[in-house]
Image (cartoon, grey):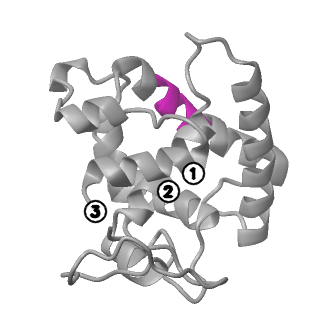
Amino acid sequence: MNRRDALGRVALLLGGTVVGAELFLSGCKNAPDKNIGAGGTNFSNDDIAYFDEIAETILPATDTPGAKEAKVGAFWATIVKDCYTEADQKVFLDGMKKLNDACQQKNSKSYMESTPEQRHDLLVALDKEQKDYMAAKKKDDPSHYFRMMKELTLWGYFTSEPGATKALRYVQIPGKYVGCIDYKKGDKAWATT
């Protein structure tokens, strides 16, 4: 599967477009001097660990690897730095702080200090908030930061080796083209076409 197909599938899962996708597909890279904020988008190892924990709460390990094993946090950092517009970077960076502040307010501790159950409950509430926001937003309004995080998690996970080979069915070098393959209830989706 090529990246364009994978991105299309992720967008289909989310019911729309993926923020940063056009820049990613065109190969554009934001100029280093356009990065915003005190630290810009030069994310630290602590930031990536924070991203991994958010992504793992969204896609936890079950009988297949979770988002953390797929190194989705590092994927987030790369896409936000290289593919997001300056405006989307600002929404994302502000969202990092908003998510942690919401956790602090709800649980009296940071996201990283919270239990898995507290993290889950917070993200469920943020998911409802982003759905309401996206339903009411105007065309030129930015995406909700939590929607960006969900998009990045799905995109990063299902294009990673663990996501494509363990969560989906994968054939590295498929044989002949077979246009119609029976699907049995409970079968994994195909990572290759």
100 shown above or below 181: above
Q: Quadrant of residue 161?
A: bottom left
147 shown above or below 85: below
On the image, numbered disc 3 is attached to which residue? Answer: 1
> How many numbered badges does the structure rendering display?
3
Mark 3 neighbour class, 10 Å CA radius: few under 14, some 14 to 19, many 20 or more: few
On whether residue 47 falls in the magenta region, the answer is no
Q: Residue at x 26, y 37 (%)?
A: 24
On the image, numbered disc 2 is attached to which residue? Answer: 154
Residue 39 in picture, x, y percent from top left: 33, 33
Mark 2 neighbour class, 10 Å CA radius: few under 14, some 14 to 19, many 20 or more: many
Relative to the observer, which residue lies in front, 29 or 1? 1
Relative to the observer, which residue lies in front, 94 or 156? 156
The label number, if any, that marks residue 13 in the structure image: 1
Q: Residue at x 42, y 83 (%)?
A: 166
Residue 53 in picture, x, y percent from top left: 54, 63
